[in-house]
Image (cartoon, rainbow, N blue to C red):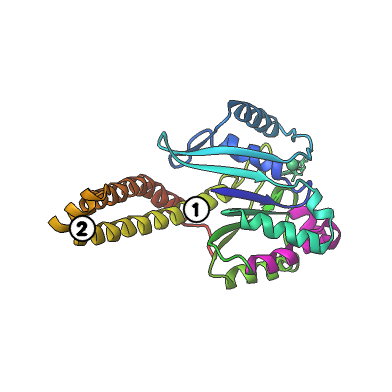
Amino acid sequence: MNIVMLGHSGVGKTTYMASMYGTLQSPINGFSLKTEHSSDHDRLVKNFSSIKRGYYPDATAIRSEYRFYLYHHGNNVFPFRWVDYRGGDVYERSDNEQAKMLHQDLLNANGVIVFVDCPTLASGNIRKSGIQRLINLLSVTLKEISHSIPVAIVLTKVDMVSDLGEREVNVLNPLLESMRASENIAGTIIPIACGTEMTNVETPLLFNLFIGIRLEVARLAELVNEHIREAEYYRSRSNPFTWIDRKLSGLRTYGELADDKIYNARSKYYALQKLEPSAEALGKYLEGCPIF
Ligand SMILES: Nc1nc2c(ncn2[C@@H]2O[C@H](COP(=O)(O)OP(=O)(O)O)[C@@H](O)[C@H]2O)c(=O)[nH]1
Ligand SMILES: [Mg+2]
C-alpha cells in the first residue's frame, strides 16, 4: 500500500510522521509499527522524543520515503510505503502543472492524507497559504480517480487554536462534497496535535490502513473465487482421453492444472485469513471515527 501525504510546507507532515511512529511503538489495541530500515526507526524515534519535549524537527525539503510494517499482536500483518512526495515545491507551480503532479501522485497512491493547519484556517488567510488552491485542485482531481482509496483530512496543530468557527471550516466544503459524491473514496476528517501532548496521532494512519486492508481482503477473496472457478473448469475437462492427449503432447494434465489452481486458491485464502482479524480489530477501533 502506498500512502501519500499532501499539504504545503510547514503544515506539520514531518512532525506528524515522527509523532505517529513514536506513539505506535507502544501497541494501541494490539497495533504497532516497525520500519524496514533501522536507520529510519532511529531517526523517527529521536524526532518523536524531541517533539514530546516540545522541540520540533527542522524543516527539510528532501523527498522522503519510508517503508513500514503494521504489526498486530506481534505479527507482521501489512507492509506499506509512505511518501512525502514533493516537499513544498508542488505548491509553487502553476495550476496546470500542479494539477498534473497531483493527478500522478493520486494515481500511484492507495491512501491519501491531506494536511490542513488549524491556525491558518482560523486566521482566515487560506488563500495566501495555498490551502484554497489545494482544496480546489483536490476536489477536481479526486473525481477522476477510478480506484478505491481512503482519504483522511488531517487538521493539524489543533492545540494552537481555541475554537474553529463554522465559517473557517466551511472552506473545506468543496473537498468534503466531492469526497462524499465519490463512490471510490472512503473519507474522514481528524483534528490532531503533536507536541508535549499528542492528540489523535495514530488515527489518520490507522484509518488508511483499515480501508487498505479491507480492500486487500476483498481482492484476495476475489482471487480465491477466481482460482476455484478455474480449478472447476480444468476438473470438468479432465478425463482419460484428455489425459492421454495432454501426456502425449508433453503438457500438464487438466487434473494437474486443477490441482495448481486449488493450491493457489488455498494460499490466497491463508493470506486473507491472516488479514481478517486485523481488519476487524481496526474497524472496532475506528468505530467513533466518521467515515463518509
Ligand atoms: N503547536 C504545534 N505546532 C506544530 C504541530 N505540528 C507541527 N508544528 C509546527 O509546525 C512546524 C512545521 O512542521 P513540519 O512537520 O516541519 O511541517 P512540514 O513542512 O509539513 O513537514 C514545526 O516546526 C512546528 O513548529 C502541532 O501539532 N502543534
Ligand atoms: Mg517536512
Residue furthest left as drawn: 240
Name which residue type carries label 1.
Gly
Please tell me which of labels 2 and 1 falls first in the chain.
1
Badge 1 residue CB within 8 Å of ligand 1: no
Residue 156: where, in percent of width, then height?
Answer: 70, 50
The residue wearing badge 2 is 235
- Measured as percent of width and height from the top left, residue 184 is found at 54, 66
Q: Which of marks 2 and 1 is in front?
A: 2
As drawn, 108 above or below 71: below
In the foreground, 247 or 94: 247
Q: Label for residue 212?
A: 1
Q: Could you say which quadrant of the image residue 155 lies in?
A: bottom right
Residue at figure coordinates x 55%, y 59% from the top left: 149
Q: Which residue lies furthest to the right in this view?
A: 128
Residue sitting at x 29%, y 59%: 230
Q: Nearer the viewer, residue 129 or 112?
A: 112
Residue range highlighted in magenta: 118-143
Residue 264 in the magenta stretch? The answer is no
Percent position (x, y) of residue 210?
A: 48, 52
Task: Check disc 2 and report its element: helix, strand or loop.
Answer: helix
Identify the amino acid type marked 2.
Arg
